[in-house]
Amino acid sequence: MRSLDRRSEAVPTGTHDALARLGMALSDPIRRAVLLRLSEAPAYPAELAESCSTSRSNMSNHLSCLRGCGLIVAEREGRQIRYELISPEFATALRTIASVTLATTCDHS
């Protein structure tokens, strides 16, 4: 059995930080909903706020958090800003995580 130090050395630099940022994003139900919605297609803040049943100002805070985590990008389109996930691979990863999670049961409260 390898020691913990050796396993840590085999992990690419930045992996722990990336997982921490993803965990922070997934810890909030609105941010989870936004990420899943954006995994389907890019969207505008008003659309996201409506689909998540929250205010535009609250959505703005969540979008700012997700941008700060490096999980979404914003692109200006005239006077509007369109949001999308950082990559199609990230969208696939989110759907995979959700499907694995859905396939398991949780017995703790």
Image (cartoon, grey):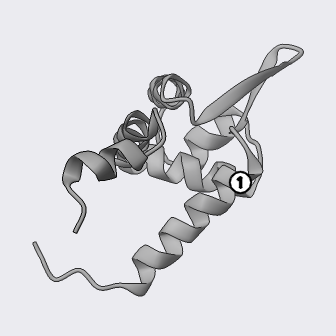
From the top left corner, tell me how far across and down residue 104 is, in percent: 35, 84
What residue lies at 83% left-to-right and 13% top-to-bottom?
79
Left or right of 24? Residue 39 is right
Pick whichever, 31 or 14, lies toward us: 14
Say if 61 sits above or below 37 in the image.
above
Left or right of 5? Residue 52 is right
Residue occupied by mark 1: 89
Pick whichever, 15 or 67, lies toward us: 15
Q: Secondary structure at mark 1?
A: helix
Say if 46 sits above or below 36 in the image.
above
Pick whichever, 42 or 14, lies toward us: 14
What residue lies at 57% left-to-right and 36% top-to-bottom?
71
Task: Kindly give the residue lying farthest to the top in the view shown.
Answer: 79
Residue 56: name its quadrant.
top right
From the top left corner, tell me how far across and down residue 98 is, in percent: 49, 69
Which residue type carries mark 1?
Glu
What residue lies at 58% left-to-right and 56% top-to-bottom?
36
What residue lies at 37% left-to-right and 39% top-to-bottom?
16
- Image quarter (top left, top right, bottom left or bottom right) of the C terminus: bottom left
From the top left corner, tell me how far across and down residue 1 is, in percent: 22, 69
Say if 102 sits above or below 77 in the image.
below
Q: Residues within 10 Å of mark 1 (few under 14, many from 20)?
A: few
